[in-house]
Image (spheres, rainbow, N blue to C red):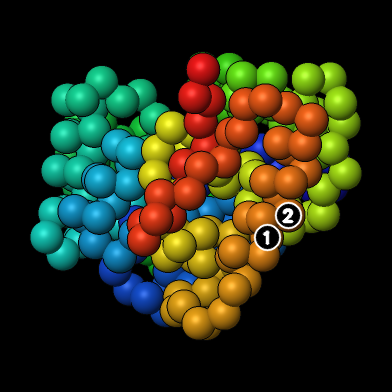
Amino acid sequence: MSSESRPGAAVGVLLVEDDLEAARLLVKGLRESGYTVEHAADGREGLARALQGQFDLIVTDRMLPHLDGLTLIERLRARGSGTPVLVLSALGSVDDRIRGLKAGGDDYLTKPFALAELLARIEALLRRAPGGGQGTRLKVEDLEFDLLERRVTRGGRELDLTTREMKLLEFLMRRAGQLVTRTMLLEGVWDLHFDPQSNLIDVHISRLRQAIDRGSDHPLIHTVRGSGYILRSDN
């Protein structure tokens, strides 16, 4: 599938998987296929991220620490979330698959599986989702991000951003109004799982802030001292 036709160019995926090596391989495969991916290592963290973030799709293992995958789905549905969920499990009997679907899962994939099949299942779920999974435009006040054309404008003025700055902005816009921590940025934008003790994030945030707020009386990127950043309108 060409990059032009790949739906993942605009799709955010939450992966909930406690096997860190399996998660690493899945995150790598999904990102190489164009998806924006966040990883949670247990059910409790997965539920919290699912409720706080704006994801187009959730992929969850069934057997998880703290909160199993089916309970995670049931609690999501009880909160009114309609986000498509794909369940991954080594339990492959008909009864197991039925339990997964009755809990609110949209599809059930038995381990082991090929990455190509996982990608095909994801694309099928996104096609069936309301709007076809085509979250192709993000908007906060007069800041707009066309995810398909990779074009950002503010007040009609096109912004000249680097690829990394666009990825950072997309991450912030998908969580508009929510606190985004340095750890979330390191994992979601740079794929780092430790703080390199550098000004990496500060430099990119500063450049992005200058680009989107230049010429505007209403700054959109706000620093929460000691915690992280929030993209929001203060109007």
Query: In whole angstroms, how far apart are the C-alphas of marks 2 and 1?
Result: 5 Å
Determine the secondary structure under disc 2.
Answer: helix
Residue pictured at 73% horizontal, 27% vertical: 216
Q: Which residue in the structure is indicated by mark 2?
A: 207
Q: Is residue 93 visible?
A: no
Judging depth in this view, the residue of 65 and 156 nearest the camera is 156
Residue 16 x/y as whole percent: 34, 56
- The answer to whether the residue labelled 2 contacts the one labelled 1, judged by CB atoms less than 8 Å apart, is yes
Q: Quadrant of residue 173?
A: top right
Residue pictured at 59% horizontal, 65% vertical: 201
> From what the image shows, is residue 230 above or below residue 197?
above
Q: Quadrant of residue 4?
A: top right
Q: Quadrant of residue 63?
A: bottom left
Look at label 2 and name its amino acid: Arg
Determine the secondary structure under disc 1.
Answer: helix
Judging depth in this view, the residue of 230 and 73 nearest the camera is 230
Residue 135 x/y as whole percent: 62, 27
Residue pictured at 62% horizontal, 26% vertical: 218
Residue pictured at 21% horizontal, 25% vertical: 79
Residue 59 x/y as whole percent: 40, 49
> From what the image shows, is residue 134 above or below residue 56?
above
Q: Is residue 18 visible?
A: yes
Residue 134 x/y as whole percent: 64, 26
> From what the image shows, is residue 162 above or below residue 52?
below
Which mark identifies residue 51? Answer: none
Q: How many marks?
A: 2
Judging depth in this view, the residue of 74 and 202 nearest the camera is 202
Number of residues whose C-alpha sits closer than 10 Å to that of mark 1, classed few (under 14), some (14–19) or many (20 or more) = some
Judging depth in this view, the residue of 118 and 226 nearest the camera is 226
Look at label 1 and name its amino acid: His
Q: Which residue in the structure is indicated by mark 1?
A: 204
